Amino acid sequence: MDFKLSEMQQDIANLAKDFATKKLAPTVKERDEKEVFDRSILDEMGSLGLLGIPWEEENGGVGADFLSLAVACEEVAKVDPSIALSFEVHTMLCSWPIWKFGTAEQKQKFLKPLAEGTKLGAFGLTEPNAGTDALNGSTTAVKEGDYYILNGSKVFNTNGGEADVTVVFAATDKSKGAKGMSAFILEKGMEGFTYGKEEIKMGIRASVQRELVFQNVKVPAANLLGKEGEGFKIAMMTLDGGRVGVGAQALGIAEGAYNEAVKYAKERVQFGKPIATKQAIAFMLADMKLKIETARLAVYKAAWKMGQPDVKSYSMDASIAKKYASDIAMEVTTDAVQVFGGYGFTREYPVERYMRDAKITQIYEGTNQVQQMIISGSILR
Ligand code: CAA
């Protein structure tokens, strides 16, 4: 066992850190306040190779691994959790299923531009009445000749309205349950594919979540991803990887808030000494660090396992990483606000933003209660 990142993994972490520090840090506060998603940031990440980290060169990638992707996501989230989310959804939830289940033609047409960053990706599963119960959606796809006709809608779609490529799930035969859902690759601009309500949120405000609407969208049969009836399995396997990404994002959020708290505790003087010299604060910092380092082990292990060819399933590892890292992100960011005292509650300092951004990591890509279902299911199976 080796706990050291390889030279390639460290290089990618440094690249992401440099980008986050120089490009994201100066504007992160403003983008959060204005609640705007800046697509040009993702374009720039693409030109640096950050959107194609784990894919082979022939697929437009840089030929690295999932641990490299996790550390890049962590570095971006330390500075800007909203951009880390767009990055994670693009890579883990849109590119991954095309890489895993796509035909050679689909990889050339969709994965390559996604990896090179000339196209942006999204993933459409959740519906107004089908969140945790993901199988119970009402979007349908009916085969007509060489096309499938899609009708329905999706909500909370990250990168929605911006994405050029969206992996969408629809029932092809409701009577078959989990074997009656199929996955499709939709392109922006397809006739009948429009956008609805944009969400106004507590956190991750510099990312976009929008409703997708499908009214008789004619999707070529060539855009079916995997086989008909494989959609639910594809969605679940995709979310396994996505949860590793959310774990990395949550880890980065916790570290970002912790770094601010340490800096402030060393500078802020009360009773004639920096507050970091007071045991009440020092012990809080110690517990924050302890939680971050243990979350790192869970996230890195799941990311490593994801890339091992002999590993059959990493569902439980992904759920452990996602649940633990998001829970500690909430705890660490809340404690960071506490270290700042009254100032932590103001928008002058970034810790309130980290706390708002942390909350969603306990909810999306499966609530933490869903992760408990998956972990307990794996133990008791
Ligand atoms: N890998 C492969 N197959 C899997 C699987 C996995 N990880 N998980 C389940 N399956 C298969 C099962 O083996 C089963 O197949 P068989 O019928 O052949 O046995 C089939 O799928 C059905 O499985 P379950 O009976 O376990 O399914 P369920 O309906 O009880 O649901 C669940 C289980 C875990 C609750 C699942 O529905 C789930 O994960 N829900 C949460 C959905 C979610 O995470 N949504 C987030 C959307 S993305 C997002 O958050 C937006 C964003 O922008 C970030």
Image (cartoon, grey):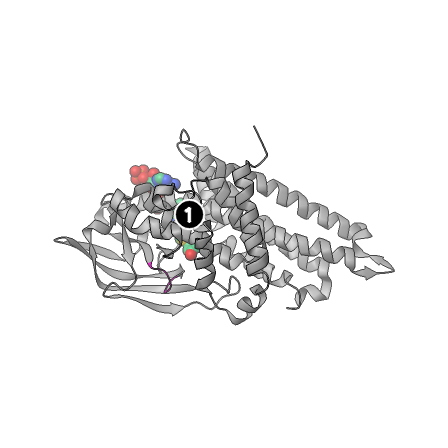
**As rendered, which of 342 and 14 lies closer to the eye?**
14
Extreme residue in the left direction: 145
Q: Position of residue 267 (x, y in %)?
A: 78, 58
Above or below: residue 165 compared with residue 228: below
Q: Please, what is the dominant secondary structure of the magenta stretch?
A: loop
Q: Is residue 365 among what the camera can see?
A: no
Residue segment shown in magenta = 160-164
Q: Residue furthest bottom?
A: 34
Q: Quadrant of the C terminus?
A: top left
Q: Residue at 56% of width from left, 69% of height from top?
A: 30
Would you name the residue on which mark 1 appears? 52
Mark 1 belongs to which amino acid? Gly
Where residue 190 sits, quadrant-wise, is bottom left
Image point 24% across, 56% down: which residue?
Answer: 140
Seen from the viewer's position, the closer of residues 364 and 90 is 90
Residue 71's spot in the image, x, y percent? 53, 45
